[in-house]
Amino acid sequence: MSKQAQHWEKTRGLLIVTLAIWFVFSIGIFLFGAEMNEVTGPFGYPLTYWFTCQGSLGIFVILIFWFANRQEKIDEEFGFSERGDD
Amino acid sequence: MLKGNFIDNLPKVYGIYTGGFLAFIIIMAIAEQMGMSAKAIGICFVAFTVAIYAIIGYLSRTAQADAYYVAGRQVPTVFNGMATAADWMSGASFVAMAGGIYFKGYGYMALLVGWTGGYVLVASLLAPYLRKFGCYTVPDFIGTRYGGNLSRLMAVIVLTVASFTYVTAQINATGTIASVALDIPFQYAVYVGLISILLCSMLGGMRGVTWTQVAQYIVLIIAYLLPVFWISNKMGAGFFPHFMLADEVARIGELEQQFGFVANSKENLAAVPKGLAGITKAHSAVNATPWAFISLALAMMMGTASLPHVMMRYFTTPSVKAARKSVGWSLFFIFLLYSSAPMLATLSKLSLIDPSLPTGIIGKSIAEVQSIDWYQNWNQANLMFVSDFNGNGTLELNEFFMGGKAVVLATPEIAGLPYVISGLVAAGGMAAAMSTADGLILAIANALSHDLYYKIIDPKAETAKRLVVARVLLVVIGFAGATIAAMEIQGILGSVIWAFDFAMSGLFFPLVLGVWWKRANREGAIAGMALGLISGAGYLIWVRNGGSGFLGITQLTFGIFGSAVSLVAMVVVSLITAEPNAATQKMVDEVRVPSGKSILGKQH
């Protein structure tokens, strides 16, 4: 397999993981919104309420930075990283 | 003066700017103590900030195509993040979001999840690849990837439909704020707003818009966070509201139980001024079905990843790597405001309905409420209303009505903050609406000037001529938007949501599959864009005219239907027609690798 094909395979793998996490916190948990709201979440807010106010939103921020770092590592591994910094 | 040197000095420049703005707020606060009128303070805030944006717009003037279209591709990640956040957070986010949460609770908060979750799709599926492509506009990518003028034209059409729906709402919002702050009729205020918008973008194009958007973000985030923290502290709810309002949220739940949600009769509601609503839904309980919540969130997420004015912000970063990081920063800056909106809604609601607080009005006598100063002000502005439906002389929960905007605009005054804060909030709302309108008008004008005029009509046009055409279009589109805004056809929030649905119906799959599916070809993309947009629009018209809809897809989520049709059409048509030629396939391979030259040259 060519270097490029391997790079793309890893990139696609990362995409699937990223989208899986995204799916859980944007769609998955809200299938059980009513049940989850009975539970007390962080800082004492009802759990579903907390996810819609802060939880999911914050997780997305972290997820994107995590994704960007992982993708950079993949690019570096195959020598496809851009020269120069940002 | 504004080249390289300026980029290196960005933190310093905006640091001084922020300090200057804070100093201005303090000067205004002192002026208020010395007897400056509320009206004069409002005018000062709006005029001062708009003047600053205009100066930045003038300093960023340019005669180069790549500076005009993509800010010279040298905007650092963090600053591009701020600019995107301002581009993104519209008048609706700033003025109406907390109100939506206040009235509709959980069902509305799907928008918070949707408008943030979409950025994960932007970062992972699209932004870095479109940056590698090196395009100036979104149709530029479609036109080059799939080839042919028809695919480019289709993309221009979808972009124009979606962005134009969005921009009328934003010009409407600038007009509303300008008319309140400057005390002039709405019909004129719309054009005052429009001229302020054009001052930022006309001379410098994307470069001008970028640096004004950073400045606008700073104003709008200070204007949003300062009152939230201040009110929370003043009410004794906690010095950091985001982590400390659990008791308040629980208390609202208790009061809701105690008062109960009494339904009003039709005759009673007829007396309530248009646009005002009462509290009829639980604050923190789950009040929507899973599908209602998820479908709205999903539509907003896919719409986010298809809206060209957001995507084009990532064309301005220096590298692919920077584009990815920049999406993270964008969402971080958006998060600062979005996570504060529910806190503001909580503080606002509790301060009004809790009888044990001095500001609480429920349970007081109607006559007493009607004699409160702030009630009279906001009642005159048509944003508050009480009526004694049951004739017991006391204000009940179901007898109090408020406009959605009042949550952001009136809460500082209700909580007893000085007027200077209300002036600041007006400046923040203006910044939010202007920055989004600028991004949208520029996206439309650039698509028409670059893709329609330069790439299709006159490919030999010289740079100077292209930029003249771009600027003329900017003004024409701005005036067209303002004219429609002045007619006040739809509400602000409704048309914003429609824009997302239009964008996802026509563009989501053609964009995503352009990168992720090599087999996607021109015929497929054209079918996907055309059928997606037509079926989405058709569904909207059907439901608006009394159609029952299916699968619980409403007029706010019609993009789910449109994009599903788009996906099926694109896959089927691609598979029954010839696969893309070798050159195109090689191009896709190159797009997938961050290093190396961009597909389109620096000047194209």
Image (spheres, grey):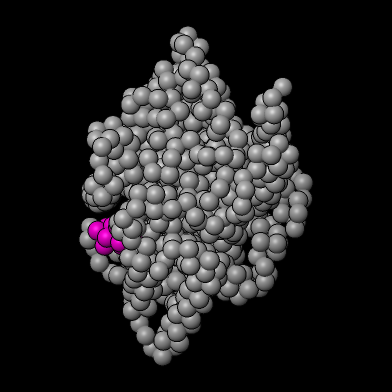
Could one spot residue B224 in this view of the protein?
no
Residue range of the region highlighted in magenta in the rendering: B190-200
Magenta region's main secondary structure?
Answer: helix
Q: Nearer the viewer, residue B82 or B549?
A: B82
Residue B297 picture location, percent across and down: 56, 38
In this rendering, is residue B463 above or below B215?
Answer: above
Q: Is residue B250 above or below residue B517?
A: below
As drawn, the residue found furthest toward the top would be B576
Q: x, y percentage for residue B426?
A: 41, 67
Quarter containing the C terminus of chain B? top left
The picture places residue B2, in percent across and down from the top left corner, at 42, 66
Mark yes or no: residue B16 visible: yes
Specify whether residue B195 is painted magenta: yes
The residue lying toward the viewer, choosing from B121 and B319, is: B319
Vertical side of B566 occupied by B119: above or below = below
B525 sits to left or right of B332: left
| Residue B452 position by quadrant | top left
Q: Quadrant of the N terminus of chain B?
A: bottom left
Query: What residue appears at the point 45 percent right and 84 percent down from the top-left corner?
Result: B27
